[in-house]
Image (tube, grey):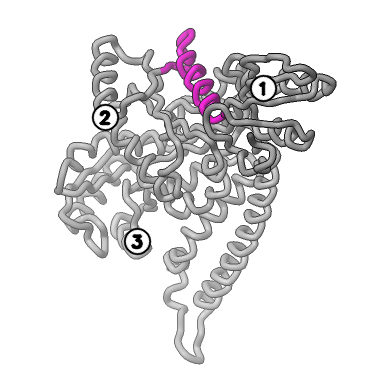
């Protein structure tokens, strides 16, 4: 049984059906079967039961009528609210945050993801322990009469706090290992896919990389672990493209905090691709949700490109309307399809242009006798022009940081012709003419 309590203010009531539909998809992902829904518009949530007393009684009758065994609220409940509603309706009650945590727990594959989800679950559970020990309420006792219920409660609390500390330490170690991996890939152009869950990020990665092993499923939160593939973008260039965990409306803050290590892949990226499901009725709201989470993670200043995906799913008239709307509010966005033939060509071209803009045009003077360095420049860079000046080869090329570093070590002269070198600080003033 799904329950929604939108605010009477603004257009929240008009969005209630869409939000319940999303909650139903979450329930389906978790393995539940939805038998009914209940909506009550509120000025403010009731402090004891979230819903009004009359609506809670109506909920009790609906549960009995439909034979529901679980009630899922679309909003996060306080421990007291959840406990009070359970007592009244006689059925287990959970909120949206708990449902999302349960889905993440069943979908976590790597040890890192499992630790992140466990940490979020324990942080969610800690303030709710008392509710879980209500069967021992009568044995609480007082000073000098401490009952086993209270003793067990305190024991569980200590165990959970200890486990939280252990998980945080292990995740810190994971982050250090990731930092080493990122340092090794620093010379490569890195791009991260971010967006609302089920917007098609994994499908884009699969098609761009030509890797059918990339897991794709038309369900919420199909992917939790970051996955990186090298993607060819043309003219001999390639980028590292990373798929990250999807976001969703009212994402539990414990979960966001736990996944900060994973999302650091996005923080270290040269470019973020914000993937939006253009065929979704409330894609603008989903865009706002993702932008808000990115801002919370400190990523709002990262270079970003909006990608309107699933354009193939729109009728021509609706597709035209979407293009016009996007042109007005998000100029320079790209319209793509991960399924249509050639539907990602425009994205590949955009990545090539972005990579080139990050690489300056340099003039390098290499002794003609240094064939090894000349070969390396041709292999790893984009050579635009080459001339001979007596016993020196003068090359104009776009080069990455690693190649620039090798040229500097060789003692060859470098001059920036156009653009700004990302690794310019690595060039000694005597090297740059």
- Count of residue discs: 3
Q: Is residue 232 above or below residue 198?
A: above
| Residue denoted by label 1 | 381
Q: How many neighbours does mark 1 have within 10 angstroms: few (below 14), some (14-19), or many (20 or more)?
A: some
Question: Left or right: where does residue 134 sit relative to residue 22?
Answer: right
Task: Give how far apart the Cα atoms at labels 3 and 1 are.
Answer: 58 Å
CB contact under 8 Å: marks 3 and 1? no
Q: Which residues are magenta?
A: 336-360
- Magenta stretch containing residue 352, yes or no? yes
Residue 164: which quarter of the image?
Answer: bottom right
**Mark 3 element type:** loop
Quadrant (top left, top right, bottom left, bottom right) of the N terminus: top left
Residue at the bottom extreme?
144
Task: Give how far apart the Cα atoms at labels 2 and 3 are.
Answer: 38 Å
**Residue occupying image coordinates x 22% and y 55%:** 51
Quadrant (top left, top right, bottom left, bottom right) of the C terminus: top right
**Residue occupying image coordinates x 44% and y 69%:** 130
**Residue occupying image coordinates x 34% and y 23%:** 278
Q: Is residue 36 above or below residue 327?
A: below
Q: Position of residue 389 (x, y in %)?
A: 73, 17
| Residue denoted by label 2 | 329
Q: First in sequence, mark 2 or 1: give its number.
A: 2
- Magenta stretch containing residue 7, yes or no? no
Q: How many neighbours does mark 2 have within 10 angstroms: few (below 14), some (14-19), or many (20 or more)?
A: few
Q: Kindly report which numbered mark, 3 or 1, lies closer to the viewer in this rendering.
A: 1
Q: How many neighbours does mark 3 have within 10 angstroms: few (below 14), some (14-19), or many (20 or more)?
A: some
């Amino acid at each position: 049984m799904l329950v929604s309590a939108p605010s009477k203010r603004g257009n929240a009531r008009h969005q209630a059906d869409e939000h319940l539909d999303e909650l139903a998809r979450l329930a389906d992902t978790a393995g539940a079967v939805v038998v009914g829904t209940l909506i009550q518009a509120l000025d403010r949530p009731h402090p004891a039961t979230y819903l009004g007393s009359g609506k809670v009684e109506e909920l009790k009758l609906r549960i009995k009528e439909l034979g529901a065994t679980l009630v899922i609220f679309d909003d996060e409940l306080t421990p007291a609210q959840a406990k009070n509603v359970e007592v009244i309706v006689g059925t287990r009650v959970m909120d949206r945050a708990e449902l999302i945590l349960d889905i993440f727990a069943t979908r976590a594959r790597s040890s890192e993801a499992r630790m992140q989800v466990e940490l979020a679950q324990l942080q969610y559970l800690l303030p709710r322990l008392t509710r879980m020990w209500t069967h021992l309420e009568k044995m609480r006792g007082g000073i000098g009469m401490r009952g086993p219920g209270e003793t067990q409660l305190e024991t569980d609390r200590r165990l959970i706090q200890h486990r939280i500390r252990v998980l945080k330490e292990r995740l810190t170690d994971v982050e250090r290992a990731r930092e080493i991996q990122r340092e090794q890939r620093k010379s490569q152009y890195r791009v991260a896919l971010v967006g609302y869950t089920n917007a098609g990020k994994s499908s884009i990665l699969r098609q761009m990389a030509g890797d059918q092993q990339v897991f794709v499923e038309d369900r919420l939160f199909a992917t939790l672990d970051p996955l990186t593939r090298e993607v060819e973008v043309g003219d001999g260039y390639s980028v590292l493209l990373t798929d990250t965990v999807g976001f969703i409306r009212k994402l539990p803050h414990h979960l966001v905090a736990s996944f900060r290590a994973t999302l650091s892949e996005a923080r270290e990226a040269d470019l973020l691709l914000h993937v939006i499901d253009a065929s979704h009725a409330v894609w603008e709201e989903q865009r706002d949700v993702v932008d808000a989470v990115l801002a919370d993670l400190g990523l709002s200043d990262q270079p970003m490109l909006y990608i309107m995906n699933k354009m193939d799913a729109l009728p021509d008239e609706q597709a035209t309307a979407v293009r016009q709307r996007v042109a007005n509010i998000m100029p320079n966005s790209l319209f793509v399809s991960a399924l249509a033939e050639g539907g990602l060509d425009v994205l590949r071209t955009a990545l090539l242009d972005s990579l080139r803009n990050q690489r300056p045009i340099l003039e390098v003077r290499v002794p003609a006798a240094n064939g090894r360095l000349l070969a390396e420049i041709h292999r790893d860079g984009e050579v635009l022009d080459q001339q001979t000046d007596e016993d020196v080869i003068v090359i104009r090329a776009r080069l990455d940081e690693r190649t620039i570093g090798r040229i500097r070590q060789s003692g060859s002269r470098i001059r920036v012709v156009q653009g700004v070198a990302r690794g310019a600080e690595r060039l000694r003033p005597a090297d740059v003419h």
